[in-house]
Image: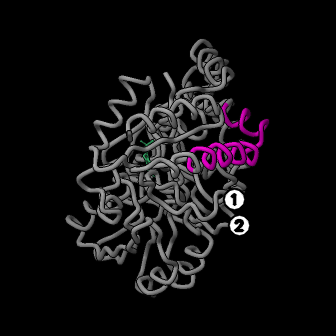
């Protein structure tokens, strides 16, 4: 199989990640529960992972690195734990359902005042629209770093400046940026960064988390065992325990920790550079095929993710993806990609789109097969 669905999840993982999970399953007890050797092994693994993740994102408080099972859970925790009845919340047309559905739920149950920055026909969000919509009444701004459909990268620093001038908190959905580009949460002015472990970070599924800037008080989403303060009737107030009730996925976290080591050794900048080159190679070739239409803003490849979504003539995107899979052994993702508002903005609600997404492990030979397949389908 030629796997070009890395924006959904990376399939090829470094061997060290797989070995770390296997070793953790053989050696780790329950992190933060007691003080025997096996539990201490797990506790150390989890603590080391917090430290590495903080360093990786240039975030200065490892204890405010909270583990979740994916970015959907991280986003639900922060959205439900920060937004209250009647709050004004700004988000965008380019968001994933992991942001939209929690926000719609609050709109319907807590009567929040929810406004969206519109995307244009290339899926671009204009900074001037953020300036128009964000005001002193805005409590929270939620925006993705990179669109999982177009691969467009949002200007988080500018959005952060606008949000902070208005006194709002900025939550960033980093599902597509973590591991695929250099993310410096301090320089970008991010208050809460949500990430998932199984995509660009090359970690196992079931891992993810959020980085919570000091001073941001998120109400717990769940309450329960924490291994500390057992006689406290409340969930402990301190991060990370405040948001981490229940046994952690320390086996997965061991894998995520090894994945961060791998990326740090290769260099996230080198990973991004290789992905940029692959994307440019594929984009330039498919743009020459009659009947292929590509979505998104490709004016600056250095500032674009390894994602190319396209359609062939008026063919249903599902049928094209099926042909790619059945006739050529190429895995892509068709349909709506959990981004309903963005498909509407791009005019692809009915057709959907076929998304090709690459990783550091994708080869030019694989891209050549995909380009050849698209030529045949289009002709
Ligand atoms: C932009 C974006 N947000 C959120 C998610 C949800 O990620 P997960 O399923 O790992 O929670 C995805 C995954 O496709 C995504 O691309």
For disc 1, the neighbor class at 10 Å (few under 14, some 14 to 19, many from 20) is: some
Report the predominant secondary structure element of the magenta stretch: helix
Residue 53 in magenta? no
Determine the secondary structure under disc 1: loop
Identify the residue position indicated by label 1 in the image.
Answer: 184
Mark 2, Cα crowd under 10 Å, few <14 / some 14-19 / many 20+, is few
Q: Is residue 210 left or right of residue 134?
A: right
Q: Quadrant of residue 129?
A: bottom left
Residue at horizontal 60 percent and vertical 47 percent from the top: 279
For residue 138, the mark is: none
Stretch of the chain drawn in magenta: 259-283
Q: Find numbered disc 2 in the image and state the secondary structure of the residue it sits on.
A: helix
At which x and y percent is residue 60?
72, 56
Q: Label 2 CB, ligand 1: below 8 Å?
A: no
- Please say if 18 is above or below 136: above
Q: Depth check: 111 or 197 in front?
A: 197
At 72% from the left and 32% from the top, the residue drawn is: 262
Q: Residue 187 carries which label?
A: 2
111 sits to left or right of 63: left
In space, the residues marked 1 and 2 are separated at their CA atoms by 5 Å
Q: Are marks 1 and 2 in contact (CB under 8 Å)?
A: yes
Label 1 CB sits under 8 Å from any ligand 1 atom: no
Residue 239 can be seen in this image: no
Question: Where residue 259 sits in the image (x, y, percent)?
Answer: 66, 32
> Measured along the vertical axis of the image, is residue 115 above or below residue 361?
below
Is residue 212 visible in the rendered image? The answer is: yes
Name the residue rendered at 41%, 47% in the picture: 72
The percent position of residue 240, horizontal first and vertical second, equals 56, 48
Q: In this view, does 305 lie above or below 41?
A: below
Relative placement, left or right, of 278 versus 91 is right
Depth order, front residue of 342/163: 342
């Amino acid at each position: 199989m030629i796997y070009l669905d890395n924006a959904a999840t990376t399939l090829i993982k470094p061997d060290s990640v797989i070995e770390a999970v296997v070793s953790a399953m053989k050696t780790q007890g329950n992190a933060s529960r007691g003080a025997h050797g096996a539990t201490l092994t797990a506790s150390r693994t989890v603590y080391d992972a917090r430290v590495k993740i903080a360093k990786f994102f240039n975030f200065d408080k490892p204890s405010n690195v909270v583990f979740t099972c994916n970015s959907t859970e991280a986003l639900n925790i922060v959205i439900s734990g920060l937004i209250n009845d009647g709050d004004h919340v700004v988000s965008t047309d380019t968001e994933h359902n992991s942001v939209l559905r929690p926000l719609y739920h609050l709109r319907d149950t807590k009567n929040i005042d929810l406004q969206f920055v519109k995307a244009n026909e290339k899926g671009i969000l204009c900074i001037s629209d953020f300036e128009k919509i964000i005001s002193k009444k805005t409590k929270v701004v939620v925006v993705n770093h990179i669109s999982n459909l177009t691969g467009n990268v949002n200007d988080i620093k500018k959005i952060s400046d606008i949000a902070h001038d208005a006194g709002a908190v900025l939550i960033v959905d980093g599902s597509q940026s973590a591991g695929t580009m250099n993310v410096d949460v301090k320089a970008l002015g991010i208050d809460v960064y949500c990430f998932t472990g199984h995509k660009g970070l090359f970690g196992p599924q079931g891992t993810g988390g959020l980085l919570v800037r000091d001073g941001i008080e998120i109400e717990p989403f769940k309450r329960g065992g924490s291994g500390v303060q057992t006689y406290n009737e409340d969930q402990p107030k301190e991060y990370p325990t405040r948001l981490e009730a229940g046994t952690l996925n320390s086996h997965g976290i061991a894998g995520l920790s090894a994945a961060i080591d791998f990326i740090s050794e290769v260099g996230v900048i080198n990973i991004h550079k290789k992905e940029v080159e692959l994307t440019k190679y594929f984009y330039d070739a498919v743009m020459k095929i009659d009947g292929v239409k590509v979505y998104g803003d490709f004016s600056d490849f250095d500032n674009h993710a390894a994602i190319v979504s396209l359609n062939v003539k008026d063919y249903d995107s599902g049928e094209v993806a099926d042909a790619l899979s059945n006739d050529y052994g190429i895995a892509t993702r068709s349909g709506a990609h959990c981004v309903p508002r963005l498909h509407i903005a791009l005019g692809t609600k009915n057709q959907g789109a076929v998304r090709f997404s690459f990783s550091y492990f994708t080869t030019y030979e694989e891209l050549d097969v995909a380009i050849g397949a698209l030529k045949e389908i289009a002709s």
